[in-house]
């Protein structure tokens, strides 16, 4: 058990270090990148042996994240402080952002759309998914847990899309289309069951 | 062609940043409050223990003693309770607590009742994190929705970050806004497994009720219990008629005999003293992420099997792990400390994100100094007001008093921030946090005497002293630095022009 824990820690440290070397290399080195990720995968497998099927890899993820944070801290401490010119006030990204920036009215509409229509559309889509999967014979608890995980993800994805899309009509079509399609699926599943 | 591609990618990044900023500006404040309270809530057992260092502690309690304590509380109830709970001693909360629908008591190891259980500040903290102090279902839903928005921030942040691998270890120190950007991006990317899983599990817990209402309306005749029964087990029908309270020691003895590797955490007697009373024992499985499994017994103590959260369908096992993954109580102190580090990182990510937003606005000629100051005010006033409520709780204020103090104080702090500016409000926040924690420690030691230095009181007291001293040193340092700059500029203004 302790041996597996130590192996998991060592592999996560080694994986992060190799990824750091790959990042430091001037040219993209796919060999190092592949090795780094393989070591991290190995770390998860080692942690898997230390505990249950769910708890082991979770401990592995914690160990990898801690190692990565330590690496960032060490890199930050080792990086020499450069005398920089005054921060540039404009760059391509901010110029572009100014170009795509929504007006106050559009931003307000986006927020309302995220909160109201995003919620309604994602609830409807997930209910439709649940009902459709149920009518196809999917096992209840698997169906329910999948739907419970899908709901916030669907809402988050819709919120991102609503904030991202610059065309109000297109996003209205997507959100209302999702609502309409979900309603059709829900009602037809209700007929079946 | 290449230029067109660059432009296309720049537009994609800009649109993603616009989505990222929009969601962050609207929901960032509440997400930050949830991040701070969530990070502290990981240690809610330690805080509960600290709030009552005089409560009896034990590593285990005999089934017969637990039964005696439970029956004593049950018989003292004026109105019959619908549920009788026994919370058993755990590593992080080595106490036995008997709870009914209306009250809770600490029990001694011999089964006698010690005193009423209270932990007003921890309860205030948990209510803030679970419901933002709103009515329960509404509050849970709002908190769940904020979790979904945090996931949306992760999505849009990843979309806005095309150099995610090329910048994986970039950190520019002492480079002003660039340092803040690097802090935000590096922590955001490397702690993604934590904050994504935490936001997801939090929003699942919060949004479960509205999804259940929708699915139950569509396919279960509005019966939400029928929807969850295959996961957590069904509640049997209530049976009319009185009966002697069920056997409590028997099922506990059975668990100790038959499942010695499991850790019994709760005993729940449903409808005690009625003909339909029945028993759930919740037992933790030390090697799993699940919160435990329900072991069911009849009133006579006959074992009826487990619900299956530990060994049933994949859906049951996954659902059973959601709570523990969110609150970090699945791997002892080491995992809790990791959650503290990741939670603090999440607070930094949220706080730095909006600082970058306001700095960018300023750089683009659209400064919003008042809003930027209000944001800084929120960042510092949230922990400071939590410390102030701790002082109030130790002075005897409970419940709504703490809620009013926290939100009222926050509003006053934000109003003050918009008047006095970013630098002053950050300094004031640190001073208030340091002083309030110092005051809390003094009140605690004065109130509990030697118990303040017992196992239950010592650790949190020492951490409180350390954070208090750190904040006061930090604010003193900043104050002297600001004074030096002020004196320097005054001196240069007094020099004659050449």
Image: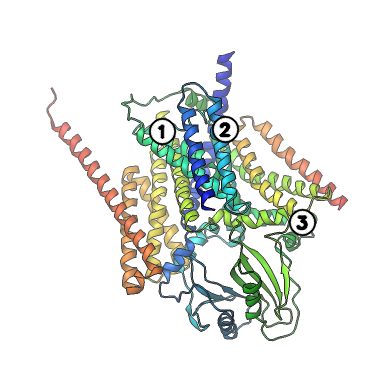
Please name the residue shown 41% across and 33% down the image.
Answer: B171
Quarter of the rendering occupied by the C terminus of chain B = top left
Calculate the distance from the C-alpha at mark 2 to the C-alpha at mark 3: 36 Å
The answer for which chain carries disc 3 is B
Dot placed on the residue nearer the N-terminal end, 3 or 1 = 1
- Would you call the spot at circle 2 few (<14 residues within 10 Å), some (14-19), or many (20 or more)? many
Residues at marks 3 and 1 touching, judged by CB atoms closer than 8 Å? no
Image quadrant in which you'd find residue B299:
bottom right
Give left or right: position of B65 versus B370. Answer: right
In the rendered image, which residue does mark 2 sit on? B159
Q: Is residue B103 visible?
A: yes
Quarter of the rendering occupied by the N terminus of chain B = top right
Q: Which mark is residue B217?
A: 3
In the rendered image, which residue does mark 1 sit on? B171
Query: Which label sits in the foreground, 2 or 1?
Result: 1
Please name the residue shown 74% across and 52% down the image.
Answer: A142
């Amino acid at each position: 058990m302790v041996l597996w824990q130590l192996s998991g820690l060592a592999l996560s440290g080694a994986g992060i270090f190799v990824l750091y070397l790959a990042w430091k290399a001037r040219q993209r080195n796919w060999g190092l990148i592949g090795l780094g990720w393989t070591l991290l995968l190995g770390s998860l497998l080692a942690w898997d042996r230390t505990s249950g099927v769910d708890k082991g890899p979770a401990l592995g993820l914690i160990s990898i994240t801690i190692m990565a944070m330590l690496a960032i801290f060490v890199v930050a401490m080792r990086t020499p402080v450069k005398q920089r010119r005054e921060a540039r006030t404009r760059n391509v990204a901010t110029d572009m952002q100014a170009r795509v920036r929504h007006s106050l009215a559009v931003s307000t509409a986006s927020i309302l759309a995220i909160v109201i229509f995003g919620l309604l559309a994602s609830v409807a889509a997930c209910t439709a998914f649940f009902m459709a999967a149920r009518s196809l014979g999917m096992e209840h608890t698997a169906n329910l847990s999948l739907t419970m995980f899908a709901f916030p993800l669907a809402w988050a994805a819709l919120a991102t899309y609503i904030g991202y899309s610059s065309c109000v009509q297109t996003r209205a079509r997507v959100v209302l289309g999702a609502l309409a399609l979900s309603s059709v699926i829900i009602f037809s599943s209700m007929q079946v069951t | 062609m290449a230029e067109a591609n660059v432009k296309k990618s720049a537009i994609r990044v800009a649109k993603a940043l616009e989505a990222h900023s929009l969601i962050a500006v609207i929901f960032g404040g509440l997400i930050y409050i949830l991040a701070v309270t969530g990070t502290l809530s990981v240690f809610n057992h330690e805080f509960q223990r600290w709030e009552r260092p005089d409560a009896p502690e034990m590593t285990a309690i005999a089934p017969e003693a637990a039964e005696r304590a439970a029956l004593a509380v049950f018989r003292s109830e004026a109105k019959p309770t619908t549920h009788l709970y026994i919370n058993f001693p755990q590593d992080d909360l080595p106490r036995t607590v008997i709870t009914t629908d209306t009250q809770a008591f600490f029990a001694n190891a011999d089964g006698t009742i010690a005193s009423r259980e209270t932990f007003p500040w921890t309860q205030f903290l948990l209510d803030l994190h679970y419901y933002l102090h709103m009515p329960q279902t509404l509050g849970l839903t709002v908190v769940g929705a904020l979790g979904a928005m945090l996931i949306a921030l992760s999505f849009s942040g990843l979309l806005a970050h095309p150099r995610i691998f090329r910048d994986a270890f970039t950190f520019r120190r002492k480079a002003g806004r660039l340092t803040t950007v690097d802090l935000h991006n590096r922590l955001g990317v490397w702690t993604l497994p934590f904050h994504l899983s935490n936001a997801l599990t939090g929003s699942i817990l919060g949004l479960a009720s509205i999804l259940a209402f929708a699915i139950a309306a569509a396919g279960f005749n509005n019966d939400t219990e029928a929807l969850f029964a295959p996961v957590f087990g069904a509640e049997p029908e209530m049976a009319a008629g009185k009966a002697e309270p069920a056997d409590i020691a028997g099922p506990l003895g059975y668990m100790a005999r038959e499942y010695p590797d499991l850790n019994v955490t709760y005993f729940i007697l449903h409808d005690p003293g009625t003909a339909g009373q029945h028993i759930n024992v919740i037992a933790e499985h030390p090697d799993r992420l699940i919160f435990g499994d329900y072991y069911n017994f009849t009133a006579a103590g006959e074992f009826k099997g487990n619900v299956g959260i530990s060994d049933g369908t994949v859906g049951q096992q996954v659902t059973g792990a959601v709570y523990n993954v969110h609150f970090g109580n699945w791997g002892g102190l080491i995992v809790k400390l990791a959650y503290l580090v990741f939670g603090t990182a999440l607070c930094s990510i949220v706080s730095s994100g909006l600082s970058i937003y306001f700095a960018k606005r300023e750089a683009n000629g659209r400064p919003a100094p008042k809003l930027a100051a209000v944001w800084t005010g929120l960042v510092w006033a949230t922990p400071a007001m939590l410390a102030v409520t701790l002082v109030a709780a130790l002075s005897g204020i409970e419940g709504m008093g703490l809620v009013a103090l926290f939100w009222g104080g926050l509003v006053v702090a934000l109003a003050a921030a918009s008047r006095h500016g970013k630098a002053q409000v950050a300094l004031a926040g640190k001073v208030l946090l340091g002083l309030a924690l110092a005051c809390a420690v003094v009140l605690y030691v004065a109130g509990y005497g030697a118990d303040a230095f017992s196992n239950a009181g010592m650790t949190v007291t020492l951490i409180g002293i350390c954070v208090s001293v750190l904040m006061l040193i930090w604010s003193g340092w900043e104050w002297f630095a600001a004074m030096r700059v002020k004196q320097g500029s005054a001196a240069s203004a007094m020099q004659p022009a050449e």
